[in-house]
Image (cartoon, rainbow, N blue to C red):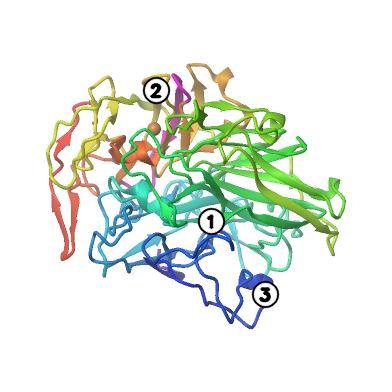
Amino acid sequence: FLPRYALEAWQAPCTTNYRYSPQVPTSLNCGIDPGHGMPLCFHRDLPIQNPNNVWTFNGTIPPKLVIGKYGEPLLFRHHNNLSPDVKQNAGFGRHTISTHEHNGHHGAENDGFTGAYFFPGQFYDYHWPIVLAGHFSMNTAAGDRMASTPDESGGLIQIPGDWHETMSTHWFHDHMFSFTAQNVYKGNAAMFNIYSGLDRGNETIDDGVNLRLPSGSLKSWGNLDYDVNLMLADKAFDRDGQLFMDIFNFDGFVADVMTVNLAYKPYFEVERRKYRFRILNASVSRFFKLALSDASPIIQIGNDGNLLPHPVTLTELDEQGIAERYDIVIDFSRYLVGDKVHLVNLCDHMDGGKLVGTKPVRDLTIAEALGGASADPCVGKILEFRVVRNPDLPDVSQVPPTLIPNPDLSNIPVARERVFEFGRDAIQTTSDPISSFIGPWGIAADQGATLAADFGRVSAAPRFGTREIWTLKNGGGGWDHPIHIHFEEGQVLARNGSAANVPEWERGRKDVYRLRPGGSITITMQFRDWGGMFMEHCHNTVHEDNAMLLRWEIDDGGTPFLRPLPTPIPTPQGVTFEAPTDILKTAL
Ligand SMILES: [Cu+2]
């Protein structure tokens, strides 16, 4: 997988963005004034942030977007330009980082493992091969047009693997052990669109493969005119208007200023036609539930990285947990030029006058959310759409009745079933000074003890090439946990033990699973293409950091895999490796 493209970014204290290209119109320069640049602030009336209050890619806004396509391996060289002095962090954020491509189907050394972090002055080369799952075992002769990627002139290049595993909407973010919440909150998060023959980012090419979803037509693939990434996150500020985080709240950190793409009170000008929005919940602990202010329909086409088997029309989306992505289509042709409509958040985190981060307190109706029924400042209107003109060209984009059907796993025997219970009052059985952490949260694997995180401990080791069924259980009713499993996507078989409880919009493949208070979810996954160490954790990143995270690895009990894999122990001088601190008896 020799890289075809290289990206380079520098994790850095925030600064003014002067990157301006006079070759393209202002609209393609993110509205940057070339004379004054774009300082890092969340609204023109909010203060410019101090360098150590916000750390982003290249230290600038707007948030970055990576565009890739299947069959074109990317090399992402991530430099760490943060201060070597760990105290230069304005009270939150760690200067060591590990960048997770969520939910990349890449070898483990490129996953951004929580223990594979790097120090100021160092860089990490992440190799993202961007292949379909099943690359080494299915359709290896690339004989199926559905398994394909766009060439540069409107045609297709066929690729190996299973086209039912085609992914679209990813993001990448810090995964530093026990500091993920602080670092992601501080600005280490960006989105990544992956294009394919099916999901082309071109709405005019009619070749029987391209789904022609709203996007644009100027380029043969990857048009963004009508395909827009929305990164939602709540933020808090100190009395001077500088970004602030309470790092001593272990239940969940919920803030009171709503941002979209790091902008407070944003508006977006749209034409009277269909748009696709790729919505990411990039909060620390806050859940969302989205609707339009006029209660008009939204078509959900994707859930997490994957397009759904069939689009689902809704007037309110489901709750959206941290790290979940919902791809939706809104048809603005039903409005008139001059109309406004808002994206509204219905999910209330205010309880008895206090913002709480353990779980959503309640879901409001649209009328309640707009009518001020909650004192939660992030409830209600979060993004204004201004309908400003008719499109120059007719809208030929489509939302076909079939998008991407699930892979059929029925002929693959289930090698093993596992149960993971997510709860409080975790114990720690190891004491490695680097890999082991103590916190109230933990995970019990297969009826074992509820253990706090140790990235040196192997808690599950499915065998390479097999399929398993995993049940994820919430240990209590007082909280919700959006659980993320790295590397492989799962099909949801049941909620609370019944397939009938799985809503239509969860019938694709997912990588984050909201357990719901007191609930459970049963999924099935197959493990193929690569081995190595991956993670499973709560994506309420405060829970993850304290210490609801475990390491699992894909194991073959022999060559080409080692058993057990040594744990990386990074230092400013380089990485050493040590034997796992613990391998649970139930892991293998
Ligand atoms: Cu959690």
Residue 546: image tag: none
Q: Is residue 425 above or below residue 260?
A: above
Q: In terms of secondary structure, where does tag 2 sit?
A: strand
The kind of residue on which mark 1 rests is Leu
Decide whether residue 459 is among the magenta residues.
no
The kind of residue on which mark 2 rests is Lys
Name the residue tied to disc 2.
473
Compared across the picture, whether 388 is left or right of 222 comes to: right
Ligand 1's quadrant is top left
Compared across the picture, whether 249 is left or right of 133 comes to: left
Image quadrant holding the N terminus, namely bottom left
Residue 26: image tag: 3
Q: Magenta residues, as a range? A: 516-531
Question: Which numbered disc flags the more N-terminal residue, 3 or 2?
Answer: 3
Query: How far from the left and from the top, in percent, is residue 234?
Result: 51, 46
Compared across the picture, whether 239 is left or right of 408 comes to: left
- Real-space Cα distance between discs 3 and 2? 50 Å
Query: How far from the left and from the top, in percent, is residue 384?
Result: 70, 50
- Real-space Cα distance between discs 1 and 2? 33 Å
